[in-house]
Image: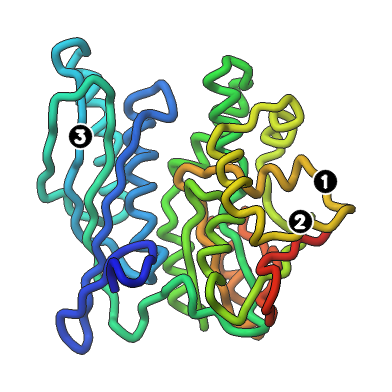
């Protein structure tokens, strides 16, 4: 699984029982605190392995840093934050690479293991599957408010906790049930990543807006017009994939296009096991998880958003 089939990570079969998952991700700071930035960047990079149904095993640091103009203690704190999440995930840091750059960037190259028959892809959904989202939406909007100096301390604390949370517990729960497909919600927003799951297929999604978990402060900031540029790009690119019913709150719909940083998993699970999986997620600390819709046959518009 690689360039010919876009998915969250590449997969290479080693034996009949072992395949390796490989992924890489790094970005510029989304928060001011270096340690917290390191945590979020590491959690984000590890997420793609979880989305493929795998277990991350090793990681390598990727660093761009202006060492001539910025104190090295900042870089040390970033790496310590990343290492904190790496250890929490049970992953071994085996090396890395750094370059001099005018702008800070940090992330990881991650390798994980998965059984070849347990790989989760984006597009293996089945008619009647239910969709579970494991983290609330709105981190991009809140981060925009932070950059504008308009976010409250409570909002900042809340969004940091969400972004820094590993998707490990959600992935562990998935492994115990009949999950057919999975992806993680990041830069393309909920609608964008759902679109990737149904493009060129006979399936579509019916989404119930009132069931989608959302950071409440993000609704307030969206009403103020604090949508990140990425949200507008996502709306423009994916508008032909979605039909929004008139009764749905337009502000909530805006949040569905919001680019997420280290977002949750979107899980397509057999409807007979949905309640049990949801209970398992809740019992293991994934307390924002919610059923947000289901898979339907669709030859036309791929995503229908109802109230």
Q: Which residue is mark 2?
A: 209
Relative to 261, 95 lies left or right? left
Whether pointer 3 and pointer 2 mark residues with C-beta atoms closer than 8 Å, the reply is no
The quarter of the image holding the N terminus is bottom left
Task: Name the residue: 43% across, 30% down.
Answer: 30
Q: Residue furthest top?
A: 69
Distance from label 1 to label 3 (Cα)? 41 Å
The quarter of the image holding the C terminus is bottom right
Q: Give how far across and how far down residue 38 sits, in percent.
A: 32, 35
Q: Secondary structure under badge 1?
A: loop
User: In the rendered image, is residue 182 in sight?
Assistant: yes
Relative to 238, 79 lies left or right? left
Residue 7 placement: quadrant:
bottom left
Q: Which residue is mark 3?
A: 63
Residue 98 placement: quadrant:
top left
Task: Name the residue: 61% across, 41% down.
Answer: 138
Q: Secondary structure under badge 3?
A: strand
Could you tell which of marks 1 and 3 lies nearer the N-terminus? 3
Residue 91 placement: quadrant:
bottom left
In this picture, is 288 found above or below 62?
Answer: below
User: In the rendered image, is residue 275 in sight?
Assistant: no
The one nearer the camera, 252 or 178, is 252
Whether pointer 2 and pointer 1 mark residues with C-beta atoms closer than 8 Å, the reply is yes
Task: Name the residue: 76% across, 40% down.
Answer: 251
Distance from label 2 to label 1 (Cα)? 8 Å
Could you tell which of marks 3 and 2 lies nearer the N-terminus? 3
Counting other residues with Cα less than 10 Å from the Cα at mark 2, is it few (<14), some (14-19), or many (20 or more)?
A: many
Q: Which residue is mark 1?
A: 249
In this picture, is 152 found above or below 13?
Answer: above
The one nearer the camera, 103 or 39, is 103
Counting other residues with Cα less than 10 Å from the Cα at mark 3, is it few (<14), some (14-19), or many (20 or more)?
A: many
Relative to 288, 193 lies left or right? left
């Amino acid at each position: 699984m690689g360039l010919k089939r876009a998915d969250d990570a590449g997969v290479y079969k080693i034996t009949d029982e072992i395949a390796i998952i490989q992924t890489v991700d790094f970005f510029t700071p989304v928060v001011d605190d270096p340690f917290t930035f390191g945590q979020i960047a590491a959690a984000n990079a590890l997420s793609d392995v979880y989305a493929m149904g795998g277990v991350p095993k090793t990681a390598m640091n990727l660093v761009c840093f202006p060492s001539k103009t910025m104190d090295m203690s900042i870089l040390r704190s970033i790496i310590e934050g990343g290492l904190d999440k790496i250890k929490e995930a049970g992953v071994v840091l085996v090396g890395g690479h750094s370059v001099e750059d005018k702008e800070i960037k940090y992330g990881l190259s991650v390798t994980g293991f998965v059984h070849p028959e347990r790989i989760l892809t984006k597009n293996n959904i089945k008619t009647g599957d239910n969709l579970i989202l494991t983290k609330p939406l709105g981190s991009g909007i809140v981060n925009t408010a932070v950059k504008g100096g308009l976010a409250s301390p409570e909002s900042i604390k809340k969004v940091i906790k969400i972004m820094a949370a590993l998707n490990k517990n959600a992935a562990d729960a998935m492994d115990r049930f009949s999950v057919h497909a999975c992806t993680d919600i990041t830069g393309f927003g909920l609608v964008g990543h759902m679109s990737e799951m149904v493009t060129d297929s006979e399936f579509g999604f019916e989404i119930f807006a009132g069931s989608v978990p959302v950071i409440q402060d993000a609704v307030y900031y969206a009403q103020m017009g604090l949508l990140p540029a990425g949200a507008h790009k996502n709306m423009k690119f994916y508008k032909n994939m979605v039909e929004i019913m008139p009764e749905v709150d337009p502000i909530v719909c805006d949040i569905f296009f919001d680019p997420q940083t280290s977002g949750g998993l979107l899980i397509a699970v057999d409807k007979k096991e949905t309640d049990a999986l949801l209970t398992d997620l809740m019992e293991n600390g994934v307390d924002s998880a919610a059923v947000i819709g289901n898979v339907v046959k669709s030859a036309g518009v791929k995503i229908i958003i109802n109230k």
